[in-house]
Image (cartoon, rainbow, N blue to C red):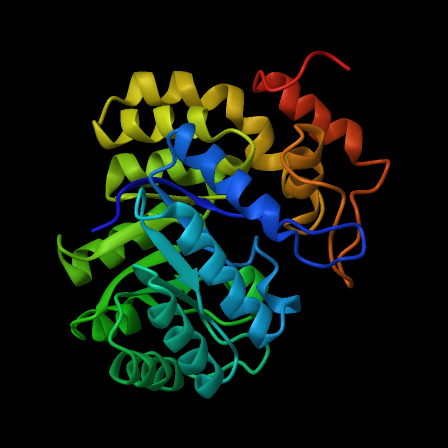
Amino acid sequence: MFIGSMVALITPMHPDGQIDEKAVQYLVDFQIEQGSSGIIAVGTTGESATLDEQEHCNMIRLVVEAAAGRVPVIAGTGANATTEAIVLSRCAKQAGADASLSVTPYYNKPTQEGLYRHYKAIAEAVDIPQILYNVPSRTACDLLPETVARLASLPNIIGIKEATGNIERAQRIRDLCGAEFAIYSGDDATAMELILQCGQGVISVTANVAPKQMNFMVQAALAKNRAQAQMLDVPLRGLHKMLFVEANPIPVKWAAAQLGLCTIGIRLPLTWLSEEAQPKVAAAMHQAGLIGAT
């Protein structure tokens, strides 16, 4: 259903931390013009953890309206309470999102049975295609391949964003879930290899600032052209690394601001990129051909 380089969109904010609604249209247009094949609204990179429920639902609506059917919109709807995840999933459906992306419940460390029941409850409560999202480095919660396989039997659970960077794990999911179950990389640094091996695409942080380059690389990987994909990925590898030199989305929002894509705005407890880290991100941007030498 969804394939290619899909951007985990930042949420543009004013310097006071309020959402810059006018900038949403600009960012969405930019992504579509540069070749992104889908847009993820209000995921981790979209600062979902610091938006209240009304803001979260409004941001989904804004992105859906801005995209206007030109590319799919996948709404981040994860929460550490199942009831809240259901509410956000309903918001996504009502706003016209094409699917939801639901991160594993963070902080409270559910068991595998708890994870199964959590996702099953959402799938049964809201008739929307659902993509699981596993990022244990941030959530302290690991959705194991065997649990993914149980969930894959539910009709509206269609895929997973696997952000461990473990290619063997992704292949294990493919073996357990079959060819129809979608696997998306949630780790830009290993996205090329995952797509070459068994994936349908990437949900990308790097694509916020280099959407055209990411699209070309992903298309080459989907075509199983390893040499071409590697050639296209090499200039991006600095970004894949340095956009995580501080907690995401701190570096990518700074990089986007340098390109004039957004203003200087982020919400506490996140802070603007430190002066010490700025030259590192700038060097990666230069390596990718986004800016001149600094």
Identity of the residue drawn at 31% across and 17% down: 227
Observer-nearest of 188 and 16: 16
Task: Tell me: 52 left or right of 228.
Answer: right
Observer-nearest of 279 and 6: 6
Task: Tell me: 94 left or right of 187.
Answer: left
Where residue 98 appears, as percent x and y from the top left, is 29, 59
What is the residue that sits farthest to the left in this orientation? 179
State the image quarter where residue 116 is shown: bottom left
Identity of the residue drawn at 78% across and 27% down: 279
Identity of the residue drawn at 43% across and 25% down: 212
Residue 205 visible? The answer is: no
Residue 286 visible? The answer is: yes
Where residue 56 appears, as percent x and y from the top left, is 54, 68
Task: Tell me: 271 left or right of 125.
Answer: right
State the image quarter where residue 273 is shown: top right
Where residue 49 appears, as percent x and y from the top left, is 62, 68
Where residue 240 appears, as percent x and y from the top left, is 55, 35
What is the residue that sits farthest to the top in this orientation? 293
Q: How many marks?
A: 0
Identity of the residue drawn at 51% across and 29% down: 210
Task: Tell me: 210 left or right of 265.
Answer: left
Q: Quadrant of the C terminus?
A: top right
What is the residue that sits farthest to the right in this orientation? 275
